[in-house]
Image: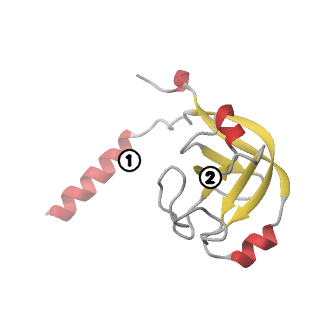
Amino acid sequence: MLKNICLFMVLSIVIGCKKKIEDPFTWKTIKVTATAYNSTTAQTDGNPHITAWGDSLRPGMPYIAVSRDLLRMGLKHNTPIKIEGIKGTYLVKDKMHYRWRNKIDIYMGKDIKRAKAWGRKKLEIQYGVIDTTKIKK
């Protein structure tokens, strides 16, 4: 009985969702220097599994850190990011030391070899800015 009710609810939702959900973001493109970092005390301050905003890091999470000048451009905490050459969407979860400019650091868990292989690249990223005109009230 419960199984039938759950199936009915799922089908009702699927059938009722005929409209495609519009992307609520306007995507802006900028060119940055991209490096990678790991959850090690040598590469981070204090606890290597906690970001500057207090988020917890676990290997495999699609997170990045940004230089503080990018914060002023709109790449704030939890901003979605698309990185040239990498599938998926990342989230801004950490911020870098004040000395860095126009730079992102891609979180690569504890895989130091992978981070070193990534190296330093100049590439384009897209970051999402909420477009209030796309959000229905």
Determine which quarter of the picture holds residue 80: top right
Q: Nearer the viewer, residue 92 or 45?
A: 45
**Which residue is at 57% across, 27% downward?**
131
Q: Amino acid at mark 2?
A: Thr
Q: Is residue 72 above or below residue 54?
A: above
* Mark 2 residue element: loop
Residue 2 percent coordinates (x, y): 16, 62
Q: Nearer the viewer, residue 112 or 2?
A: 112
Q: From the viewer's perspective, tell me whether residue 66 is left or right of residue 121.
A: left
Q: Return the residue at label 2.
A: 89
**Which residue is at 79% across, 67% downward?**
118
Q: Residue furthest left?
A: 1
**Which residue is at 70% across, 56% downward?**
105
* Mark 1 residue element: helix
Q: Amino acid at mark 1?
A: Val
Q: Which mark is residue 42?
A: none
Residues at marks 2 and 1, CA–CA distance in whole angstroms = 25 Å
Residue 21 percent coordinates (x, y): 50, 37
Count of marks placed on residues: 2
Q: Nearer the viewer, mark 2 or mark 1?
A: 2
Q: From the viewer's perspective, tell me whether residue 99 is left or right of residue 12.
A: right
**Which residue is at 21% across, 64% downward?**
3
Q: What colour scheme does the image use?
A: secondary structure
Sort mark 1 into few (<14), some (14-19) or many (20+) by Cα contacts within 10 Å: few
Disc 2 to disc 1: CB gap under 8 Å? no
Q: Nearer the viewer, residue 53 or 107?
A: 53
Q: Quadrant of the N terminus?
A: bottom left
Q: Return the residue at label 1.
A: 14
Precedes in sequence: disc 2 or disc 1: 1
Q: From the viewer's perspective, tell me whether residue 102 is left or right of residue 56.
A: right
